[in-house]
Image (cartoon, rainbow, N blue to C red):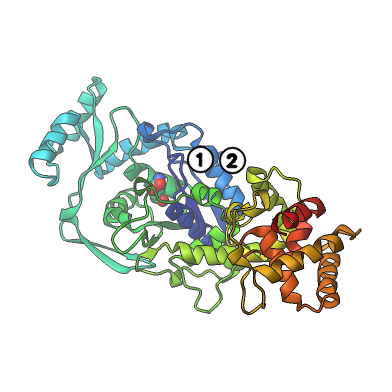
Amino acid sequence: MKARTRFAPSPTGYMHIGNLRTALYEYLIAKASGGDFILRIEDTDQKRYVEGATDIIYNTLKTVGMNWDEGPDIGGNYGPYIQSERLPLYQEYAHKLVELGGAHYCFCSKSEADEQKDEEMNIKFKDPCLHLSLEEAKKRVAAGEPYVVRQTINKKGKATFNDVVYGDIEIDYDELDEGVLLKSDGFPTYNFANVIDDHLMHITHVVRGNEYISSTPKYNLIYEAFGWTPPIYVHVAQVMKDAQHKLSKRNGDASFQDLVAKGYLPEAILNYIALLGWNPGTEQEIFSLKELEQTFDEKRLNKSPAIFDITKLKWMNGCYIRALPFEEFHKLADKEYDTFLTREVNRKELSKVLQPRIETLKDIATIAAFIETLPAYSDELFINKKMKTDAEIAKKSIALAIPALEGLNEWTNESIFECLKAVAVENGLKNGQVLYPVRIALTGLETTPGGASEIAAVLGKQETLTRLKQAA
Ligand code: GLU
């Protein structure tokens, strides 16, 4: 069967990592079957509307390469794909549902309903309007009295349904709330709109967070009242910050945008979140989106919550950085250089040195800070047993290196390296006795990305000589 799945985000102005993961699983279920991935904007909660939020949704999906087959911007056979443009549809179906006995008109004011709920400590709202005859209720509607359409749940016993991840689920009908489906302003609630849209858009698989499991029997009652077949349900476990806390915006946790701003590559984030709740059944950890499309199987989704492990993401990001074609890495690195480098240096050489050594793009500014400003260092740094150097040998080597480098015409890693080696040989020194002190003098650091000649090539001849003269 060709699957039709949908990503149905609310435009909150923020792409939560858990939501992006849901979108990815939806996308993969569709693509693994050669089916369609649909984008639907759920903006019926007007209180939550955030300017520019749909662009964040579009941009995020495009950035990670999850292109949709139908959606607000490209249309499709089942539009509109923005819920606020579908109000007449919800209204039509809400009235139909009342006729079918799946819902009723309720004339209680919001405060009456809220009060009863509060008083009864959130025990189910017992709607006095349930007892009105349909005829009487319709008369009041026709007379212009404000009303909501409220779901009617008159079943006893247990609702059962199957979920791909959690298996057979049973919930007492008694636990279900007769919630509002259509508000007095004519807007649907999520609980109603999701069913109408999923049916009208021919959605085959509904993938969403497991917090929706407890409401699923309510949705099934609506499908049943209309005589429609419910979709296949795929409820996914939460993404957790740790064993107790959900990853949430309220806790200041990362969104996709935050992670990109922290120097993570979109492809690495996508790869990481694919594995956050899904197990390929092999040892493979690095997957491109195309590979995921070929490998994904929703039966391998995990029931247990996934803990967002930033260390693992960092490691994976490092793998992606190293795998980038050099020119692509250099382009990304160049933008980082602009944030802290005012000095004219050989940026390409710097990129060569950094690419194998960083895990996030933001590491660049820290690791390469010495290129911009030589940190203060003590002569003790020249003491190194393994390299057989101390401050005295260092000063001597540096003094010998200066004229040799001054005479060098071609300024490349290789030519500098050969020149420094020659200085060692000609003066009866070991290579390390020249290379080590030169590296310290150029960086002021014990550990550096790259060796003496690589760093000299980055710094350029003039700055190299200035730093060496400062140390001599
Ligand atoms: N708008 C809902 C959300 O963002 C969608 C849930 C669903 O996929 O049905 O949580």
Residue 443, x across and y down, in percent: 66, 59
Q: Residue extending furthest front? A: 392
Disc 2 designates what residue? 75
Q: Is residue 281 above or below residue 26?
A: below
Tag 2's secondary structure? loop
Which image quarter is the C terminus in?
A: bottom right
Q: Is residue 122 above or below residue 413?
A: above
Specify the amino acid type for callout 1: Tyr
Residue 92, x across and y down, in percent: 37, 35
Disc 1 designates what residue? 81
Kindly tell me whether residue 33 is visible in this rendering: no
Tag 1's secondary structure? loop
**Which residue is found at the position 45% from the left and 56% from the top?**
22
Residue 331, x across and y down, in percent: 72, 51
462 left or right of 70 in image: right
Q: Would the CB of label 2 be found within 8 Å of ligand 1?
A: no
Q: Nearer the viewer, residue 137 or 398?
A: 398
Q: Residues within 10 Å of mark 1 (few under 14, many from 20)?
A: many
Q: Nearer the viewer, residue 299 or 463?
A: 463
Specify the amino acid type for callout 2: Gly
The reply to whether callout 2 and callout 1 are in contact (CB within 8 Å) is yes
Q: Quadrant of residue 468?
A: bottom right
Quote the CA–CA distance across marks 2 and 1: 7 Å
Label 2 vs 1, first from the N-terminus: 2
Kindly tell me whether residue 298 is visible in this rendering: yes
401 left or right of 367 in image: right
**Which residue is found at the position 55% from the left and 50% from the top?**
260
**Which residue is found at the position 8% from the left and 43% from the top?**
120
115 left or right of 10 in image: left
Q: Nearer the viewer, residue 359 or 284?
A: 359
